Amino acid sequence: MRSSLSVYLKGFLMGAADTVPGVSGGTIALITGIYERLINAITSVGPSDARLLLSFHTAEGRSDLRDLFMRADGVFLLILGFGIASAVLTLSRVLEHTLEQFPAFTAAFFFGLIGASAIVLYSEVDVGSPKRLAVALFGIVLAAGLSSLPESAIGSSYPVVFIAGAIAVCAMILPGVSGSFLLYVLNQYEFMITNLTAFVDGVIALADGGDLASLTESFTVVVTFCTGAMLGLLTMARVVKWAFREFRAGTLTFLVSLMVGGLVKPMSTIATEAQLGSTPEVAGIVMFALIGAGLVLGVDSVTGDIDY
């Protein structure tokens, strides 16, 4: 029981970190000592294992699934996943409110989180060679370009949500990179936060005697995102892990550069609020940016000399 509670709490911390575009859940997994166990569990399952579901109706098929569950450390993943989901669903309501009521302050907070994350990881980056510099510039331009696009340019159709889920979940296996940051750059962050909140509200309303109408749309969005995330774990996450292992310096350079380019997003939000004449005092903007940066630097001080 104590072990399960410990795993749940660690999952909750991972979920809390991954809900905001700054500290990554992978970093929290490192700090709490479950990173290697998590990676081993995730990579023990491959796309080919999905075929076992087709034979679930047979005794042999169910036995194979039980073996797969044990091989993938299934109990650990379920408890950890429940902790992550609890944090995401809890904090999404708070973030939806702050994004709507205090967009400039929230953007400043995100700016601090992302900027400090880039600074922390910059010590691991070497752009001394022309190739590495080209990778860095590509990452900055790519993130800045995506961050500058209006939300209508990409939209939030189901294929986009599916792909966003597959991309964002890859951050789970890389300490230092937040999945929420990738959603933020892709203009899917606020959309997913809103739908998560609507999903929770719909479930509560349904349990209280409501109908399915209030749940249908948000449920479809959440399921689409989770399906993309699951496929990402089984496919793209392996590619990212391979790239990080074989081309660590170049991959890290690209990821840090994405963070630098992604700073365009919160800055544009603050600028938009200024144009609307509703920008809070500069002192408030600076304060929330410093709070965000302080959280990241505080986590980094706990990690000490952990190798990213």
Image: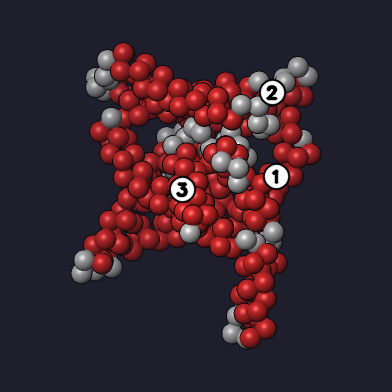
Q: Helix, strand, or loop for circle 2?
A: loop
Q: Residue at x 67, y 72 (%)?
A: 67
| Residue 9, disc | 3
Compared with 201, 269 (above or below) is above
* Mark before the other along the chain sequence, 2 or 1: 2
Badge 2 crowding class, 10 Å Cα cut-off, few under 14, some 14 to 19, many 20 or more, is some
Compared with 143, 219 (above or below) is below
Mark 3 and mark 2: Cα distance apart in space: 32 Å
| Disc 1 target residue | 241
What kind of residue is marked 3?
A: Leu
Q: Residue at x 60, y 46 (%)?
A: 34
Left or right: residue 20 versus residue 195 is: right
Left or right: residue 242 versus residue 191 is: right
Residue 99 location (% of width, % of height) = 32, 35
What kind of residue is marked 1?
A: Lys
Q: Helix, strand, or loop for circle 3?
A: helix
Mark 2 and mark 1: Cα distance apart in space: 18 Å
